[in-house]
Amino acid sequence: MKRALAALALTALAGCSSQGQEPHASVASTDACDKVAHYDIPARRFDETAQQLAHATGCFVKTDLTRTASVRVNGIHGTMSIREALGTAIRGTDLEIADSEPGTVHVVGQ
């Protein structure tokens, strides 16, 4: 039950997007995960970083929060897509991008 609620919580949060608040967005693709933006996100828990990225871009971050939520990830600083930002955040951790599809990036824990 906790797993289902945790997954639903991130799903609900990831579906939100802050329209009109896309800092420096400049990409021709219609895929939310390819939007380029400037990030200045400190190092913290993965669930917090994933939520902020999802809100900023509208890209869905699919993950099992029971395995990934508390993992401490790197800060993200600079201009890049959400896919690149997630890669930067999880570099050197036990997390990895398993796959991605239009509008979704799947992050798993080992």
Image (cartoon, rainbow, N blue to C red):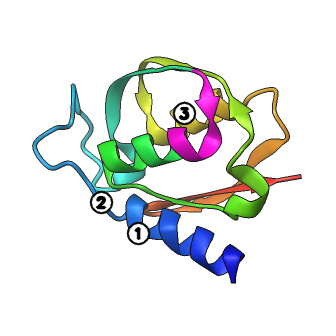
Residue for badge 3: 84
Viewer-proximal residue, 78 or 27? 78
Q: Quadrant of the N terminus?
A: bottom right
The kind of residue tagged 1 is Ala
Tell me whether the residue at label 2 lies in contact with that at label 1, contact meaning CB atoms closer than 8 angstroms: yes
Residue 16 x/y as whole percent: 29, 60
Res 12 label: 1
Determine the residue positioned at 71% across, 32% down: 72
- Is 107 one of the magenta-colored residues? no
| Nearer-N-terminus badge (2/3) | 2
Residue at x-position 34% and y-position 53%: 32
Q: Is residue 29 left or right of residue 69?
A: left
Snapshot quadrant of residue 58: bottom left
Q: Secondary structure at mark 1?
A: helix
- Specify start and end residues of the magenta stretch as a single range: 43-49
The answer to whether residue 42 is above or below residue 45 is above
* Between 46 and 25, the one nearer to me in the picture: 46
| Disc 3, SS | helix
| Distance of label 1 from label 3 (alpha carbons) | 22 Å
User: In this picture, is 87 found above or below 104?
Assistant: above
Query: Gap between marks 2 and 1, in whole Å?
Result: 7 Å
Q: Which amino acid lies under the numbered mark 3 shown in the image of this protein? A: Glu
The answer to whether marks 1 and 3 mark residues whose Cβ atoms lie closer than 8 Å is no
Are the residues flagged by discs 2 and 3 in contact, CB closer than 8 Å? no
Residue at the disc numbered 2: 16
